[in-house]
Image (spheres, rainbow, N blue to C red):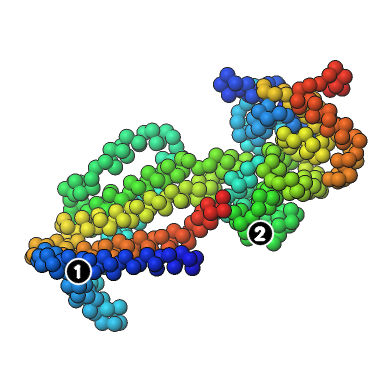
């Protein structure tokens, strides 16, 4: 459903990403992992139509992406600036639904349902600044869910919350998106997280970023924070991805790519 | 909250101290130009606050002076605010418009509004329209420039979120840009409210036969020094009350902003 063909982008003479080729199938959860400064955010912003890539193409459902596609939602890393502080959680979630042509009642019902799914039904009337970071990110996730996108982009969504909240949110996203059959492209610098969350892990090189590894994650579902992480397959895959991210891969690993 | 009220109250001790010093200084000097505050207070009461209880003690003179003045002040301020916010939003959101208009705005802003009084007379004749024009021209700048600045500097993440979720242009403008710029707009509104009081007086000094400014002028021309001081005190109190009411309104409307700032 998502296809990147030779996607490249430069800021002046600085090449952020260079010829990224990637295909994401319907219903897949793909994690893109790479060292900091490898152009992960540039990649996401190109897909979301927030920047116009200087080279290559982005195809969503076979159609080239111009401006921002209407069947795509983004969960940003910086929840504190992605939610509007002058709106309650409910209003933040329901505001994007105006585009869907729903009346006020239907928008609020859909927003309430999404907030309930992320466990925030009781906090619908609260304002972002009355909530913890984890709660705010849940509201962001609810906003994306209520929008019913066919593709959900997540830009380091758990990068600004504490470790425990992070685990809760990882499981929440896996559970909710499996339930809706949503396709997810999640960008992270955390190797562990990419293997835990993804059906597939795509590794980007240092800038100019390009795909250096594309590994299927063959772990039994549903994932469990303790049991999954102690599986031999998980440990092996994590090590493999980790070495790729650091750029030290031997010949054997190059072949398995 | 109770601590803030407590602090405000403990700050009040300075007022009697200043009043006593003022009283002592004017009595020692014994100059007709500088009447004692006690005399001024008596005159304020005689002039405006010795009316019937049913009208909150306001005298006929008070109503004749205050009503047209406050009417001009608020009409001018509201007109300028509406025009300033709309124009400021357009300028803040369109770099091209800003480039076109910026030299003219800087030029207009630099002109002291009283200098334009003859032009306004020529345009609108003597009367309410001229008085409003003086006030509007003088107070529009803080609102306009602050609104433009607030709309220009909306957090990029707010705008990108709106783009990702495909907000319509109207939703983007009224539901994202305007609220995001509101703290700056209110700073401009508050500044222009205090300017509006000054320009209200200015507008009544020229070509008016009613209002506080006109009263001040007549008192001055008749060498009624205590009356002049009474008008000065009245204007000071009015400015204080306007500012206090505006702050109360602002803290209601911008409570999200003030409370969000405190938690970050």
Where residue A208 sits, quadrant-wise, is top right
- The residue indicated by pointer 1 is B23
Which chain is indicated by disc 1? B
Q: Which residue is drawn at 66% across and 37% down?
A: A69
Secondary structure at badge 1 equals helix
Residue at the far left: name it. B222
Residue A115, numbered circle: none
Q: Where is residue B169 in the image (x, y as percent from the top left)?
A: 53, 43
Crowd band around label 2 with a 10 angstrom C-alpha radius: few (<14), some (14–19), many (20+): some
Residue at the far bottom: name it. B53
Q: In this view, does A53 lie above or below B205?
A: above
Q: Do labels 1 and 2 share a chain?
A: no
Q: Position of residue B102 (x, y in %)?
A: 35, 36
Where residue A156 sits, quadrant-wise, is top right
**Mark 1 or mark 2, which is nearer to you?**
1
- Relative placement, left or right, of B160 versus B230 is right
Nearer to us in this view, A216 or A36: A36
Q: Residue at x 42, y 53 (%)?
A: B186
- The residue indicated by pointer 2 is A124
Q: In this view, does A257 lie above or below A111?
A: above
């Amino acid at each position: 459903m998502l296809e990147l063909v030779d996607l490249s982008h430069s800021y002046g003479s600085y090449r952020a990403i260079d010829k990224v080729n990637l295909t994401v199938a319907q219903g897949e959860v793909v994690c893109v992992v790479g060292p900091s400064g490898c152009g992960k955010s540039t990649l996401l912003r190109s897909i979301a139509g927030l920047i116009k890539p200087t080279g290559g193409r982005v195809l969503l459902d076979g159609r080239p992406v111009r401006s921002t596609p209407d069947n795509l939602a983004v969960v940003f890393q910086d929840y504190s600036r992605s939610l509007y502080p002058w709106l309650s959680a409910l209003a933040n979630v329901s505001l994007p639904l105006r585009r869907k042509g729903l009346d006020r009642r239907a928008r609020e019902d859909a927003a309430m349902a999404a907030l309930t799914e992320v466990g925030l039904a009781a906090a619908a009337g609260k304002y972002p600044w009355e909530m913890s970071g984890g709660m705010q990110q849940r509201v962001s996730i609810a906003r994306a869910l209520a929008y019913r996108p066919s593709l959900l982009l997540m830009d380091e969504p758990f990068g600004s919350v504490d470790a425990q909240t992070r685990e809760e949110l990882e499981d929440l996203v896996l559970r909710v998106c499996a339930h809706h059959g949503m396709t997810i492209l999640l960008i992270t610098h955390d190797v562990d997280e990419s293997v835990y969350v993804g059906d597939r892990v795509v590794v980007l090189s240092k800038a100019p970023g390009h795909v250096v590894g594309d590994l299927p994650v063959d772990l039994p579902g549903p994932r469990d924070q303790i049991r999954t992480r102690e599986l031999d397959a998980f440990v092996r895959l994590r090590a493999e991805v980790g070495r790729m991210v650091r750029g030290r891969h031997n010949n054997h690993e190059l072949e398995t790519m | 909250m109770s601590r803030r009220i407590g602090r405000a109250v403990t700050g009040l001790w300075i007022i009697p101290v200043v009043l006593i010093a003022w009283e002592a200084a004017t009595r020692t000097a014994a100059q007709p130009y500088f009447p004692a505050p006690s005399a001024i207070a008596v005159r304020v009461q005689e002039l405006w606050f010795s009316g019937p209880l049913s009208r909150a003690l306001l005298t006929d003179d008070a109503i004749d002076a205050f009503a047209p003045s406050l009417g001009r002040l608020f009409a001018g301020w509201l007109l300028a605010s509406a025009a300033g916010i709309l124009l400021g939003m357009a300028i803040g959101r369109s770099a091209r418009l800003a480039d076109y208009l910026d030299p003219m705005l800087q030029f207009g802003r630099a002109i002291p509004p009283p200098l334009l009084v003859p032009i306004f007379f020529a345009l609108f004749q003597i009367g309410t329209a001229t008085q409003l024009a003086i006030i509007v021209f003088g107070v529009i700048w803080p609102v306009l420039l602050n609104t433009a600045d607030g709309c220009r500097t909306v957090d990029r993440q707010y705008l990108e979120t709106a783009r990702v979720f495909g907000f319509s242009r109207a939703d983007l403008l009224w539901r994202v840009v305007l609220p995001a710029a509101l703290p700056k707009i209110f700073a401009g509104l508050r500044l222009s409210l205090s300017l509006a009081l000054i320009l209200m007086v200015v507008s009544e000094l020229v070509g008016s036969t009613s209002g506080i400014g006109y009263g001040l002028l007549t008192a001055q021309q008749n060498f009624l020094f205590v009356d002049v001081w009474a008008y000065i005190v009245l204007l000071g109190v009015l400015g204080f009350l306007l500012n206090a009411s505006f702050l109360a309104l602002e803290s209601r409307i911008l409570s999200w902003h003030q409370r969000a700032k405190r938690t970050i």
